[in-house]
Each structure stands twice: as C-alpha cells, then as structure tokens.
Image (tube, helix red, strand yellow):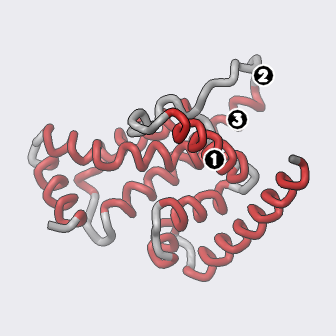
Amino acid sequence: MSLIDEDEALIAAALNGSAYAWEKLVKRYEGKIYNHGLRLMGDSSDAMDLMQEVFLGVYRNLHRFRGDAKFSSWIFRIAHNKAVDLKRRKRLLSSQTRVSEQEETDIFASIPGESNLEPEKTVGKQQQNRAIIAMLGNLPIEQRLIVELKVFQAQTFEEIADMQDISVNTAKTRFYTALKKLKVVSEETHVLS
C-alpha cells in the first residue's frame, strides 16, 4: 500500500471516528510539519504553535479534504497559511508593544526524532540547522516557503504552484530568486568568518 493510499485509509477511518487513525495520521506528519515550521518561523516555540494550529485546523476541516491533491500537499498548504498568519500576528504584536529580550533557547532541543543521534553528530546537525535557519531568515516568507517546499519537502513546481495559488513560472521565479539571495548571504557569511 502506498503512502497516499495509507493516508486515504487513515483519513476515512478518522472521519468515521477512529481516534487511532487520527493519532497515526498526526504522528506521520508532526515531525515534518514541526521542521517545516522551524525553517519558516525560525523559532522552536513558534514552530510548536504552528504545528498545533495546523493539526487543530486539519482536525476541524478533515471532512473538507476532497482528495483532489495529495494529503501532504493539503496539510502543507494549511501550514503555509497558518505560518503567514502567525508572522502577521507577531509583527502586529511587536509593533504595538515592546517585549523584553528573552534568553536564547536551544531551538533544536525539542525536534521530534533527534534524540537517537550520537552527541557529535547531534551538535554538527544543530550547527548546520542553525546556519540554514539563519540564511532562510533573510528571505521574504514567500521565497522561504518555496525553498522549504522544493528542497525540504521535495514538492514539484506544479504542486507548489497549486498549493500557493500561483503559476508554475511564478513558483520557479521565486525559487531561483531565493537561491540567488541565499548564495549571496552564504558568500557574505564565509567572507566574515
């Protein structure tokens, strides 16, 4: 049974009231959504908030999933919309009130599935992830999302265009523009270090 067929079976069972099927569906996507949120939001608590909002939205609207696209495409579209909403809310809050600086936290401490790596590999992976998140933070949210979907979620430009309600050419343009910006940031970082 393919992943798509399994998703469809789990969705049908969850819609019929199976808590087990819903839990299995959540477990299948929670790590992916969390990591997606972490790369988009740049903060672990925001990524957790995003993940919770995504699954709450999916739970409330699962009956609306028509199966026109893959379930993974649908859930990542919800994640994108929620990420944009969260960014907008954060911007509004920060412009209305100034909050004191919080202590820096290790944004990778709670990534699901990372606990089984060897300590040296974990540290190296954390440093690499920090660098990637910092570089992605230099991109506008629209470009950051395209990079996330293309590179980390292995979506096609057609799937990205469908999720974003944009043309395939626009998706490609945003992706290649983002890559150029990331290259410049990467080169500047290497010059400074």
- Please tell me which residue is depicted at 42% across the width and 49% down the height of the picture: 32
- Please tell me which residue is depicted at 18% across the width and 60% down the height of the picture: 6
Comparing labels 3 and 1, the label whose residue is closer to the camera: 1
| Element assignment for label 2 | loop
Residue receiving disc 2 = 98
| Image x and y of residue 17, in percent | 11, 42
- Please tell me which residue is depicted at 16% across the width and 53% down the height of the picture: 10
User: What amino acid type is highlighted by mark number 2?
Assistant: Arg
Which of the pair 3/85 is nearer the observer? Answer: 3
158 relative to 181, above or below: below
The quadrant in which the N terminus is found is: bottom left
Mark 3 surroundings within 10 Å by alpha-carbon count, few (fewer than 14), some (14 through 19), many (20 or more)? few
Mark 1 surroundings within 10 Å by alpha-carbon count, few (fewer than 14), some (14 through 19), many (20 or more)? few
Residue receiving disc 1 = 128
Q: Which badge, 3 or 1, comes first in the chain's sequence? A: 3
Query: How far apart are labels 1 and 2 at the CA level?
Result: 31 Å
Comparing labels 2 and 3, the label whose residue is closer to the camera: 2
> Can residue 46 be seen in the rendering of this structure?
no
The answer to whether 117 appears left or right of 45 in the picture is left
Query: How far apart are labels 2 and 3 at the CA level?
Result: 11 Å
Which of the pair 148/184 is nearer the observer? Answer: 184
Q: Which badge, 1 or 2, comes first in the chain's sequence? A: 2
Q: Which badge, 2 or 3, comes first in the chain's sequence? A: 3
User: What amino acid type is highlighted by mark number 1?
Assistant: Gln
The image quadrant that residue 172 belongs to is bottom right
Which of the pair 116/36 is nearer the observer? Answer: 116
Residue receiving disc 3 = 92
Which of the pair 27/91 is nearer the observer? Answer: 27
- Please tell me which residue is depicted at 51% across the width and 29% down the height of the picture: 109
